[in-house]
Image (spheres, rainbow, N blue to C red):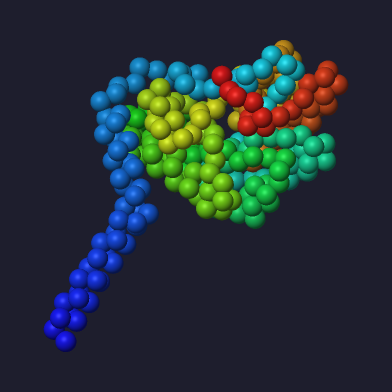
């Protein structure tokens, strides 16, 4: 009996150790620690929308446009423009949708529907919609991630949320406000996220009038990446983008998802 008790105790201890080693939270902490160690001595010199490593164009000169649409999950930004999405579906206009974690929580069924639609692909728009900084820089009155650990949370927690819900890990990341320092971009790349900016500011956070949206697309050329929003149904974005799509299609432009081309 004593030998059996010792054997049982050792077996339970081994099982416990094995469980700890395969615990997702332990793995996550190890990931964060490895990222922190790798980048802790790197001091950023850039801060903006187009810092080194941010991809802003498709690798083509053809009359091709990638329509990227954000859902920010900020206060007042939890909406869902179902009529804009319905128009894209009707006209078979593909798009890459950058979705924030808080928006997903408030729009779960809509998110699942979008993620299951082959016309769209899901991008990572962060856990809490923070600018991507390793030292807490801010923009537009929004504080960025305070340090490397917080930056990893901002990127990775939403990537894992999306993967858990869709069985597909997002490939592309756009931070809240689309601001970065170049070290943050490298960290995102280490987390297997390609950082995507834009070459066409389509609706300026859903603040443009329909006429301003049309003007933003006036001089588009081949390989543009455009940014607009689909979380503000009360805005003029839908009206402006529908006008733009009709005009550009008439001019021979084709709309694609980001994954249809390599980025530069």
Q: How many marks?
A: 0
Does 224 sit above or below residue 88?
Answer: above
Query: Looking at the picture, how far across and down is residue 37, in whole percent?
Result: 26, 34
Residue visible at 29% across and 23% down in the picture: 42
Query: Furthest-front residue in view?
Result: 3
Q: Residue furthest left?
A: 2
Q: Quadrant of residue 228?
A: top right
Residue drawn at point x = 75 percent, y = 18 percent: 63
Q: Quadrant of residue 3?
A: bottom left
Residue 138 lies left or right of residue 78; in this view the side is left
Q: Position of residue 109 (x, y in %)?
A: 65, 55
Residue 129 image point, x, y percent: 49, 38
Q: Is residue 208 visible?
A: no
- Determine whether 231 is above or below 19 in the image: above
In-image side of 85 versus 189 (left or right): right
Q: Is residue 258 visible?
A: yes
Q: Quadrant of residue 67?
A: top right
Residue 17's spot in the image, x, y percent? 25, 62
Determine whether, in the image, residue 81 is placed left or right of residue 127.
right
Q: What residue is rendered at 49% in x and 43% in y?
A: 159
Query: Residue at the location (40% across, 18% down)?
Result: 46
- Which residue is at the far right? 250
* Up-down relation of residue 235 to residue 1 (above or below): above
Quarter placement of the N terminus: bottom left
Left or right: 75 in relation to 211: left
């Amino acid at each position: 009996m004593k030998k059996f008790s010792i054997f049982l105790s050792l077996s339970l201890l081994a099982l416990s150790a094995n469980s700890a080693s395969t615990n997702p939270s332990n793995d996550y902490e190890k990931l964060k620690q490895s990222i922190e160690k790798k980048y802790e001595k790197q001091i950023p010199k850039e801060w903006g929308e187009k810092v080194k490593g941010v991809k802003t164009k498709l690798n083509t000169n053809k009359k091709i446009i990638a329509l990227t649409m954000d859902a920010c999950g900020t206060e007042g930004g939890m909406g869902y423009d179902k009529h804009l999405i319905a128009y894209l579906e009707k006209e078979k206009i593909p798009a890459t949708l950058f979705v924030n974690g808080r928006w997903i929580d408030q729009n779960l069924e809509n998110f699942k529907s979008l993620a299951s639609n082959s016309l769209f692909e899901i991008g990572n728009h962060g856990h809490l919609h923070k600018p991507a900084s390793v030292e807490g820089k801010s923009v537009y009155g929004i504080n960025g991630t305070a340090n490397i650990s917080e930056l990893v949370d901002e990127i990775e927690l939403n990537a894992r949320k999306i993967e858990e819900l869709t069985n597909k890990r997002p490939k592309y990341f756009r931070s809240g406000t689309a601001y970065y320092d170049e070290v943050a971009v490298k960290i995102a790349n280490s987390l297997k996220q390609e950082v995507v900016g834009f070459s066409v500011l389509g609706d300026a956070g859903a603040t443009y009038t329909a006429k301003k949206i049309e003007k933003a697309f006036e001089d588009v050329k081949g390989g543009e990446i455009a940014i607009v929003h689909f979380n503000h149904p009360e805005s003029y974005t839908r009206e402006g983008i529908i006008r733009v799509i009709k005009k550009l299609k008439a001019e021979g432009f084709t709309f694609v998802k980001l994954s249809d081309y390599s980025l530069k």
